[in-house]
Amino acid sequence: MHILSPVDLIQRQLDAYNAKDVDAWLATYAADAQQFTLHGELLAAGHAAIRSRILVRFAEPDLYAELLQRTVMGPIVVDYERITRNFPESRGTVEMLCVYEVADGLIQKASFALGEQVVIAPALAR
């Protein structure tokens, strides 16, 4: 089995996210991986909890992550992204900083920092 480099693994994860392919996305994570807010609370641990969390997000019809910048330092990959989301108010975007720790070819830990939500006003009826 070929182990992907950290940067190739994170790109595969991003591609699966944008394709809303939960199995391909989850395959980039270790079975006991953990997700956190940056420097804070545990969001999910293990495939079952991570799957449950992402399936809610993948249900959003406009979900898409645009990679704005990527920094790689050995097994650490940091992505700066603009995420298009479907918020209760309307479609919008949020900037996100994603810090991934890779070991043995899989994401072991991921931490996320969210920026401000920008709601795109719905089109006016004509």
Image (tube, grey):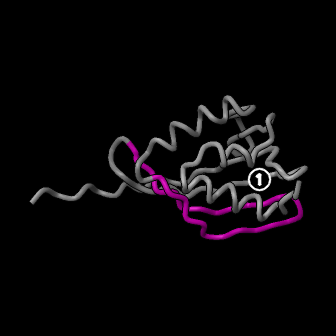
To which residue does mark 1 refer? Answer: 100
Residue 24 image offset from top left, x and y in percent: 66, 48
Residue type indicated by callout 1: Tyr
Residue 63 image offset from top left, x and y in percent: 47, 52
Q: Residue furthest top?
A: 48
| Quadrant in the rendering for residue 46 | top right
Circle 1 Cα neighbour tier, 10 Å, few/some/many (<14 / 14–19 / ≥20): many
In the image, is residue 101 above or below residue 77?
above
Q: Is residue 23 left or right of residue 115?
A: right
Residue found at x 58% / y 50%: 114
Residue 74 image offset from top left, x and y in percent: 89, 63
Question: Which one is in front, 64 or 78?
Answer: 64
Picture quarter with the C terminus:
bottom left
In the image, is residue 48 above or below residue 126?
above
Q: Residue furthest front?
A: 1
Count of number-bearing discs? 1
Residue 78 image offset from top left, x and y in percent: 74, 61
70 inside magenta stretch: yes
